[in-house]
Image (cartoon, rainbow, N blue to C red):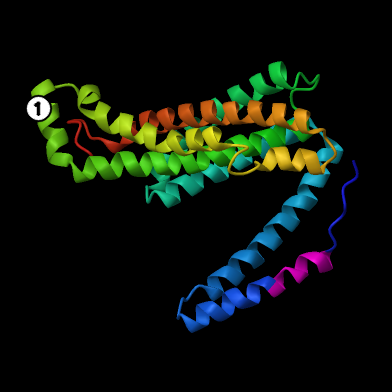
Amino acid sequence: MNVNGISYLSIISLGILLIPVIIINVKLNININKKILYAIGRMVIQLSLVGIFLQYIFDTNNPLINIGYLVLMILVASYSTVKSCNLNIKNFIIPLFFALIIPNIFVLLFFNTFVTRIDNLFNAQYMITIGGMLLGNCLSGNIICINNFYKTLKQNQNEYLYSLSVSGNKIEALTPYFRNAILASVNPTIASIETIGLVALPGMMTGQILGGAIPFTAIKYQIAIMIAILITRYFCSILSILFTSIRAFDEFDILKI
């Protein structure tokens, strides 16, 4: 199977389909045209720079560089989570970094060892691409989980304090909020797994088919990556709450943030 290349002119031609979007926004006074154009422009610049850098990483394929790039990705994801959840960077960047890096590295190494069974576990082709998919899903899951946990806890602070005073046990008092936050984080992934192949063909599977892989090979990879995503997202969510809660409560178990 051959893959048809996409020219830059072909990509630019998609701009024609943006014209009616812009016109409708103007007519309905929906002020997102600048935001749309800014987002597309930023995406083009970012992906172009990443493409150049990834080409260098793939050509070099140095384990230290590969690991360093993955750690950088996790650091950026940690910063993005802190900013999206309106947390203090100084207090929460380190807990979230470890909450992300521990499950991601463990599942990634397990995936490369027992699923893809590659000789070089730090091969850039697998480490960066698989790691990126795992991390991207963990990022969205962490934002949902942390926002849900602390927002719900803050809204029901009197209820939490009552439970705390009755039980005298912080873990027992926090368990309902912890449970709801984990469910909020993993439910979108579970829903995606349930409907995959029926509602839409996922990105990894589509990419492999376009790259020339036979459908059944692409399907096996997609099944494996979806299970890996669910596991990584689940444990990242748990660790994010556990690690951030160390700094989120005072010595009397009262929420500070």
**Residue 33 or 94: which is nearer the viewer?**
33
Residue positioned most to the bottom: 27
Quadrant that contains the N terminus: top right
Q: Residue furthest right?
A: 2
Near mark 1 (Cα within 10 A), the count class, few <14, some 14-19 or many ≥20, is few
Measuring from the top left, give residue 137's x and y in whole percent. 55, 39
Farthest residue in the front direction? 198
Total tally of numbered discs in the picture? 1
Q: Give x and y (percent) for residue 232.
A: 53, 28
Q: Residue at 32% across / 34% down in the picture? A: 180
Query: Left or right of 10: which side holds 137?
Result: left
Quadrant hosting residue 69:
top right
Pointer 1 residue:
165
Magenta region, main secondary structure: helix
Quarter in which the C terminus is drawn: top left
Helix, strand, or loop for circle 1? helix
Range shown magenta: 8-16
> For the point 70% across and 72% down, which residue is it?
15
